[in-house]
Image (tube, grey):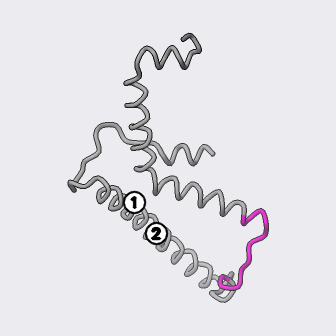
Amino acid sequence: MNDIILASNKSKGKRPYFFDDAAVERVLNITMAVAQELAVTRERLDTLERLLEKKGIIYPVDIESFTPNEAQAEARQRAHATYIARILRIVQQEVEAIRQDAASNRSMEDIAEELGQS
């Protein structure tokens, strides 16, 4: 769970925007996050497969026929959740900003009602 929280950390300062439409900007940021993650993963996977095959430890057919056990499948699911949290980080940060803005614009009546003092 900490990995998911850390994946949604944001940088200090304002985010630079390049398009007038915030939705286009959001989709571009998500797409670029996915592209970056995929490029790194493919490079590392290629390295591992080449090293393992060179040493005679494992061959491509072994990789293609592998089925994870229950614990491995659960670990993969956690990794997927962390990955998605990183990719959708910008959306989460925007939702948090909207909530903070809404919370800071509450009236005294709203605050008193929340505290059960009205």
Instruction: Name the disc covering residue 30, or none.
Output: 1
Measured from the top left, where is residue 48 in percent x and y?
57, 74
Between 23 and 42, the residue placed more toward the observer is 23
Q: Is residue 96 magenta?
A: no
SS at circle 1: helix
The number of numbered discs placed on residues in the rendered structure image is 2
Between 43 and 85, the residue placed more toward the observer is 85
Earlier residue among tags 2 and 1: 1
Q: Amino acid at mark 1?
A: Ile
Residue sitting farthest toward the bottom: 61
If the image is split into quadrants, where does the C terminus sit?
Answer: top right
Q: Which residue is mark 2?
A: 38
Measured from the top left, where is residue 26 in percent x and y?
34, 56
Instruction: Name the disc covering residue 104, or none.
Output: none
Q: Is residue 77 above or below residue 55?
A: above
Measured from the top left, where is residue 71 in percent x and y?
77, 62
Tell me which residue sits at (65%, 85%) in the image. 64
Q: Is residue 32 above or below residue 96?
A: below
Question: Dot 2 surroundings within 10 Å: few (below 14), some, or many (20 or more)?
Answer: few
Tell me which residue sits at (47%, 73%) in the image. 43
